[in-house]
């Protein structure tokens, strides 16, 4: 989720990846993964597949299982969302392509965004992949004041996105940028980097002698969207590709519009337990492999997400 970045971040699930602050690794991600709302996976083969080019790079445990368990929050079209009972989108398609290079099946399970890294570090998932902004807080398990709250995670960066502001179609309140939200109600998903972006903007407002942003934080992004649509908030804040997709599709393009340019662009990363360096290295190699063979580009073009393309995978490239 977007740069400060959660999920969303963390919004910026750009999804960029803090209840009242950035959602970070370990205890900062306050809740567990919550009710599991669905699952999906790649179409790559199950079990050992020694013919896959990068299979031998995987940890033995995952080779034996033939499955890579991925946690996500499937509410961020086009990045990850549910359709026909399956989790689909940019991230699931990229994961499926990675699975083919690695010779394992990738199985997604959806839960609450602000619990993904906690669930990862507890062993529930092998990876978390949910438009999670890679930043130092999450890498080191820190809150926004630098307090150590958890072990942190490593990230394999695979996409870039920033924070975007969206409003009702026609922009009835005349909001032209995030700076115009001083003293105004704005909706956002809790535990995301774009929640942190609003908190940072609110401080800028008060430092300038203006009223603070009236931040309305919700458990999920759908609630935040509904608040904007009903007029209870003048704007919502989300990852740029998510906001653009929302404006394009909600009510056939008649519900919302994105205003201004994306800000604070940063990398989305696949989160991996810090003790699992072997898996981190395997995923880095797999991301580079799908970039090199053109699969990555085709996936982004399929979902209209080409603006987030990177040239090479980076481990812990977020700041």
Image (tube, helix red, strand yellow):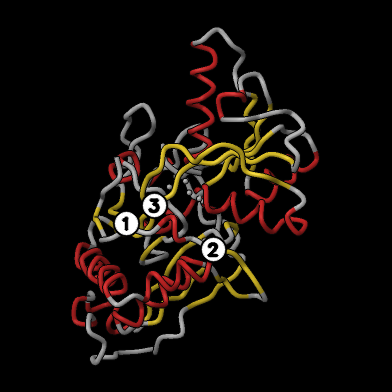
Q: Nearer the viewer, mark 1 or mark 3?
A: 3
Residue at image position (50%, 52%) is 32
Whole-percent x, y for residue 153 in the image? 30, 51
Q: Find numbered disc 3 in the image and state the secondary structure of the residue it sits on.
A: strand
Q: Quadrant of the C terminus?
A: top left
The label on residue 160 is 3
Image position of 276 with respect to 142: above or below: below
Labels 1 & 3 near each other (Cβ < 8 A): yes
Image position of 32 with respect to 276: above or below: above
Q: Is residue 174 left or right of residue 112?
A: right
Q: Nearer the viewer, mark 2 or mark 3?
A: 3
Neighbor class of circle 1 (other Cα within 10 Å; few <14, some 14-19, many 20+) is many
Which of these two is toward me, 242 or 112?
242
- What residue would you read off at disc 1? 157
Q: Find numbered disc 1 in the image and state the secondary structure of the residue it sits on.
A: strand
Whole-percent x, y for residue 268 in the image? 39, 53
Which of these two is toward me, 51 or 66?
51
For marks 2 and 3, the one nearer the N-term is 2
- What residue would you read off at disc 2? 80
Q: Disc 1 and disc 2: Cα gap in Å?
A: 16 Å
Residue at image position (41%, 60%) is 128
Neighbor class of circle 2 (other Cα within 10 Å; few <14, some 14-19, many 20+) is many
Labels 1 & 2 near each other (Cβ < 8 A): no
């Amino acid at each position: 989720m977007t740069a400060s970045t959660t999920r969303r971040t963390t919004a910026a699930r750009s999804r960029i990846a803090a209840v009242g602050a950035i959602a970070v690794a370990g205890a900062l991600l306050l809740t567990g993964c919550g009710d599991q709302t669905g699952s999906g996976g790649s179409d790559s083969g199950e079990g050992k597949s020694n013919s896959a080019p990068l299979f031998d790079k995987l940890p033995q445990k995952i080779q034996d299982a033939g499955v890579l368990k991925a946690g996500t929050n499937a509410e961020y079209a086009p990045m990850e969302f549910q359709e026909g009972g399956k989790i689909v989108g940019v991230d699931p398609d990229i994961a499926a392509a990675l699975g083919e290079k690695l010779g394992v099946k990738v199985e997604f399970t959806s839960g609450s965004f602000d619990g993904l890294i906690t669930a990862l570090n507890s062993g529930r998932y092998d990876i978390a992949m949910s438009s999670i902004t890679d930043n130092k807080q999450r890498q080191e398990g820190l809150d926004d004041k630098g307090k150590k709250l958890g072990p942190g995670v490593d990230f394999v960066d695979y996409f870039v996105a920033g924070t975007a502001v969206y409003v009702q179609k026609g922009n009835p309140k005349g909001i032209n940028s995030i700076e115009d939200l001083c003293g105004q109600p704005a909706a956002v998903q809790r535990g995301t980097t774009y929640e942190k972006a609003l908190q940072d903007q609110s401080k800028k407002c008060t430092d300038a002698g203006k009223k603070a942003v009236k931040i309305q934080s919700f458990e999920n992004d759908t609630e935040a969207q509904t608040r904007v649509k009903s007029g209870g908030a003048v704007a919502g804040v989300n990852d740029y590709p998510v906001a653009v997709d929302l404006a394009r599709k909600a009510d056939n393009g008649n519900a919302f519009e994105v205003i201004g340019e994306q800000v604070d662009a940063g990398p989305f990363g696949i989160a991996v337990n810090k003790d699992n360096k072997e898996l981190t290295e395997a995923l880095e190699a797999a991301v580079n492999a799908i970039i090199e063979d053109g699969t990555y580009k085709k996936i982004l073009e399929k979902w209209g997400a080409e603006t987030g393309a990177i040239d090479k995978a980076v481990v812990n490239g977020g700041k």
